[in-house]
């Protein structure tokens, strides 16, 4: 599992995950993911290169979303692999974290939710 993060504008970070978000993958990216959530107000998570997500991966995303919400921020998922999106919907994650078809849609939603 690989993680890349890049600032898109002040307070907004794009995190791209590449690989299986299973127990091993989540352990590999957790420190960097947490750091990205701590440093930003809005985090966009690109899941286009994440073909599998286990419950530990869902936990990672929800923990990040909860931390962001506590400080008035938000987490947005985008460009999900179709199988991963099915898992997110089946588990109800989509009711807690916004899922967007593209990065551009997520960025537009992030701008309206952060007041920028």
Image (spheres, grey):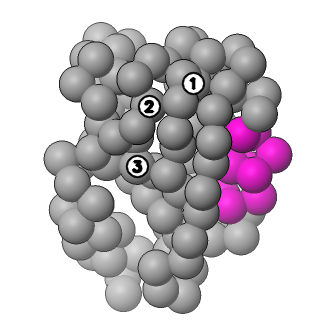
Is label 3 in contact with label 2 (beta carbons under 8 Å)? no
Which mark, residue 50?
Answer: 2
> From the viewer's perspective, is residue 45 above or below residue 27?
below
> Residue drawn 32% across and 77% down?
111
Q: Is residue 36 magenta?
A: yes
Residue 56's x, y, as percent? 64, 18
Q: CA distance from mark 2 to mark 1?
A: 7 Å
Instruction: List the residue tagged with mark 3.
Output: 46
Q: Residues within 10 Å of mark 3 (few under 14, many from 20)?
A: many
Above or below: residue 24 compared with residue 64: above
Disc with the residue nearer the chain's start (3 vs 1): 1
- Label 1 near label 2: C-beta < 8 Å? yes
Horizontal side of residue 110 vs 105, given as left or right: right
Give the distance between the C-alpha atoms of the residues marked 3 and 1, in whole angstroms: 13 Å
Element marked by disc 3: strand
The N terminus lies in which quarter of the figure?
top right
Check whether the beta carbons of the residues at disc 3 and disc 1 lie within 8 A of each other. Answer: no
Which residues lie in the magenta part?
Answer: 29-37
């Amino acid at each position: 599992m690989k993680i890349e993060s890049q600032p898109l504008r002040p307070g907004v970070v794009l995190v791209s995950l590449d690989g299986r978000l299973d127990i091993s993958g989540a352990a590999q990216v957790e420190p960097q993911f947490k750091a990205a959530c701590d440093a930003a107000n809005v985090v966009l998570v690109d899941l286009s290169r994440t073909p599998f997500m286990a419950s530990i991966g869902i936990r990672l995303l929800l923990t990040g979303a909860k931390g962001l919400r506590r400080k008035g921020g938000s987490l947005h998922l985008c460009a999900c692999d179709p199988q991963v999106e099915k898992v997110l919907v089946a588990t109800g994650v989509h009711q807690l974290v916004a899922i967007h078809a593209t990065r551009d849609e997520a960025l537009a939603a992030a701008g309206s939710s952060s007041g920028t």
